[in-house]
Amino acid sequence: MSSTTILENVIDERADMVQLTPETLDRILAEGWRLLGKRFVRHNFSTWRMQLCRTIPLRIRLADFELSRSQRKILRQNEDLLVISAPAKFDSDRERLFDLHRNRFHEKQSTTLASFIHPDYPHLMPTEGRELAVQLDGKLIACSFFHLGKKTVSGTYCVFNPDYERRSLGTLTMLLEILMAKEMGLDYYYHGYTHDIPSQFDYKLSLSGLEYMNWETGKWSHRERLPVRNWKEMLK
């Protein structure tokens, strides 16, 4: 017997991307908006493996963030990599990396990096955009993109070469962005959302200082981190 999920008070909003002040980016991120290509979007529902589910916006309260033992291990095992912080850019090297990266996903595949990063002004839209370009022996193997508010950071997107999956490059760049934001004295790091059912996004729950937004009240509350072993087991 199949079950049917009925969603009430559906939110599904989009707006064309425009340039924002850093303070305005702080505000809209706190309202559940996120950056997606040339648009701002927010929605309280999605689908995962053909099942309708709710989305749960997430962020990290940076004052409460501490590295776990496994996260320290990821940083140590990647000390041989060269990580370059620079203004975000959209070019053929990053597009090729995206093509490799997207083949990891079995559903909701996008065809271009432009679905996630502004293709013309990634360094300016909607605020200052930066990247962490990760190289091994001169070869680009990962690149993460983030945008700066006044007191926040939007962890906008990351692509990596799946041939190096054992290095946990997506987690590596996210940790580096968080540590950078914490060192800058910022308040929050927004790293997207998860679902109210087990999904591929549950790795985002393995961070300390985790908070989630209640769509009905708009308030953010503390959430206990989910150990890595737990969410991997849930996805089997």
Image (cartoon, rainbow, N blue to C red):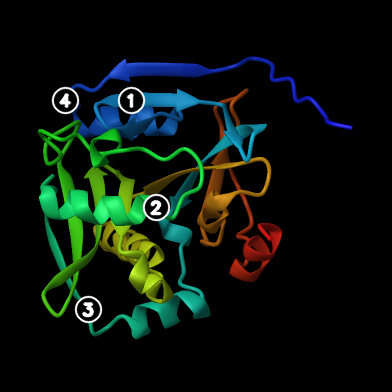
Residue that label 2 marks:
103
Of the two numbered discs 1 and 4 on the same chain, state the one appearing first in sequence: 4
* Labelled pair 2, 3 in contact (Cβ < 8 Å): no
Residue that label 1 marks:
40
- The amino acid beneath tag 3 is Leu
Label 1 and label 2: CA atoms lie apart by 25 Å
Label 2 and label 4: CA atoms lie apart by 32 Å
Query: Looking at the picture, how far across and down is residue 24, in whole percent?
Result: 27, 27
Query: Looking at the picture, how far across and down is residue 48, in whole percent?
Result: 60, 39
Front label number (1 vs 3): 3
Residue that label 4 marks:
19
Residue that label 3 marks:
81
**Residue 70 shown left or right of residue 21 in the figure:** right
Front label number (1 vs 2): 2
Q: Residues within 10 Å of mark 4 (few under 14, many from 20)?
A: few
Of the two numbered discs 1 and 3 on the same chain, state the one appearing first in sequence: 1
* Labelled pair 3, 4 in contact (Cβ < 8 Å): no
